[in-house]
Image (cartoon, helix red, strand yellow):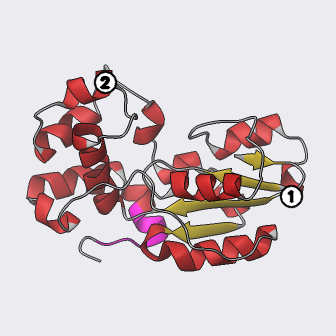
Amino acid sequence: MIHHKHKFIFIHIPKTGGTSVKKLLRMNNFEKSEIYGHAPYKAYTDYCEHYKEYFTFTIVRNPYDKMVSQYKYFTESQNAKPTKKVKEYFKGYTFKKFLKKFYTKPYVGDSTHRIIYMDMLHPVDQIDFIGRFENLQEDFDIICEKIGIPQQQLPHNNKTEHKHYTEYYDDETREIVAEKYAKDIEYFGYKFGE
C-alpha cells in the first residue's frame, strides 16, 4: 500500500495482521493504493521515484506461528480468500503434509505467501519501522503517530482459530520451518516457543 499525500509505504507480508492494518487505514480515508496485495519493497521503489522521502513500515511474525496460521487459513478459512481452488488443493491435509507441499511446485495460490521476510523487505535496512505481530497494537500506535492519524484499536480481520502454534510441531516440521525461514529467524531473533 502506498499513500502519496501522507507519504508512506506499507509492505504487507501475508498472515501478519496486514489486512487489519490496511482496513483501518482505509477507514481513515486513505485512498486505495496503486500497488495491491503483498508486493515486496522493490515493487514500491521501482514504482515511486521519491520512495526515500516516504515513511516505510511493515509487520513481521514468528515464522513458526505464521505457518500454523497459514495452514489454518488455507485449509479451514470461511473467508472469501483464499480461493476455492486453494482450499480444494489443501483439503484434508495434516500440518506436516501441508508444510511439505507448501514449498513445492506447482504452487496453487498467491506465491507471495511463500516469500521469506528478508526477501520481501530487501534491502531491510531501508525500512523505517518493523512492527511485530506479537505486539501488534503497540506497534500500530507508533505507526499511527508517524503517519499522522489518531491512535485507534485495530480490528482483527482474517483471524484463524487454533491452539498455540507449538502444539502443531514435531522435530521434522520444526526443521522445515527453521530451514525455510532461517534468514528471518536469525535477523529478527525469533525462537520456537517464544
Viewer-side residue, 22 vs 178: 22
Q: Which mark is residue 42?
A: none
Q: Is residue 24 magenta?
A: no
Q: Where is residue 40 in the image (x, y as percent from the top left)?
A: 61, 42
- Mark 1 — residue? 6
Q: Which residue is drawn at 24% across and 58% down?
A: 161
- Contact between marks 1 and 2 (CB within 8 A): the answer is no
Q: In whole angstroms, how far apart are the C-alphas of marks 1 and 2?
A: 37 Å
Name the kind of residue labelled 1 in the image: His
Residue in front for this viewpoint, 19 or 80 = 80
Which quarter of the rendering shows the C terminus?
bottom left
Height in image: 72 above or below 8?
Answer: above
**Residue situated in front as seen by the camera: 11 or 106:** 11
Is residue 169 visible from the viewing direction of this image? no
Residue 152: x, y in percent? 63, 74
Q: How crowded is mark 2: few (under 14 residues within 10 Å), some or many (20 or more)?
A: few
Residue 72 appears left or right of 83 = left
Q: Position of residue 94 (x, y in %)?
A: 10, 42
Residue drawn at 16 percent across, 52 percent down: 173
Lower position in the chain sequence, tag 1 or tag 2: 1
Q: Residue at x 42, y 40 (%)?
A: 113
- Label 2 sits on a secondary structure element that is helix
Q: Is mark 1 on a helix, strand or loop?
A: loop
Residue of label 2: 84
Which stretch did the figure color magenta?
Answer: 185-191
Rendered residue at 39%/34% (across/down): 80
The reply to whether the magenta stretch includes residue 190 is yes
From the viewer's perspective, is 81 left or right of 88? right
